[in-house]
Amino acid sequence: MNRFIVILYCLICISNASYSQYKLDIEISEIRNNKGNIMLQLFDGKEKVLNQRQSAIKDNKCLFSFNNLTPGKYAVRYYHDENMNGNMETNLVGKPTEGYGFSNNIIGKFGPPPFEKWLFEIDDDKKIVLKPTY
């Protein structure tokens, strides 16, 4: 009987761990101005877009919250849509003229950084602070 209780307890613990759901808070700070919105995408570890949101800027920062995330790898990319046209503006050679960024505050050299460098782990509630590149 004791062995049965131990096995049942272990199965319940494993089951609860696999269905754990966490919260991710994202703060984007040091935004150049309060014009426009921040457009943000949340990806899973396989580069699939899980959620896409936009949010207004207040006091040169913007906050996003995602609930019910399962443990795993995630990534974020975003841009500051200053003129609110729904597109990231670029100059003649393709360099962005509006702020942008990726999770882990990773910066690419000639284009976006490799997706693997954006990845971060969720295994508990988490808050990340990101700063755009202008």
Image: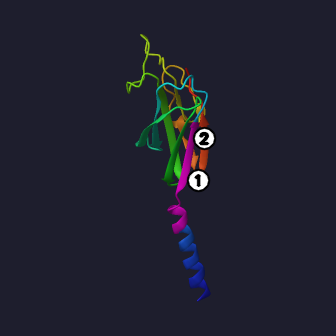
67 relative position to 30: left or right: left
In front: mark 2 or mark 1?
2
Q: Which residues are magenta?
A: 15-27
Coordinates of residue 79 in the picture (x, y in percent): 48, 28
Coordinates of residue 109 in the picture (x, y in percent): 54, 21
* Whole-number angstrom distance, CA of label 2 to CA of label 1: 14 Å
**Picture colour scheme:** rainbow
30 relative position to 20: left or right: right
* Residue 24 is a magenta residue: yes
- The amino acid at mark 1 is Asp
Residue found at x 58% / y 38%? 27
Q: Quadrant of the N terminus?
A: bottom right
Q: To which residue does mark 1 refer?
A: 123
In this view, 123 is above or below 52? below
- For the residue labelled by badge 2, is the local secondary structure a helix, a strand or a loop? strand
Locate residue 61: give its quadrant.
top right
Judging depth in this view, the residue of 105 and 130 nearest the camera is 130
Q: To which residue does mark 2 refer?
A: 128
Locate residue 28: give its quadrant.
top right
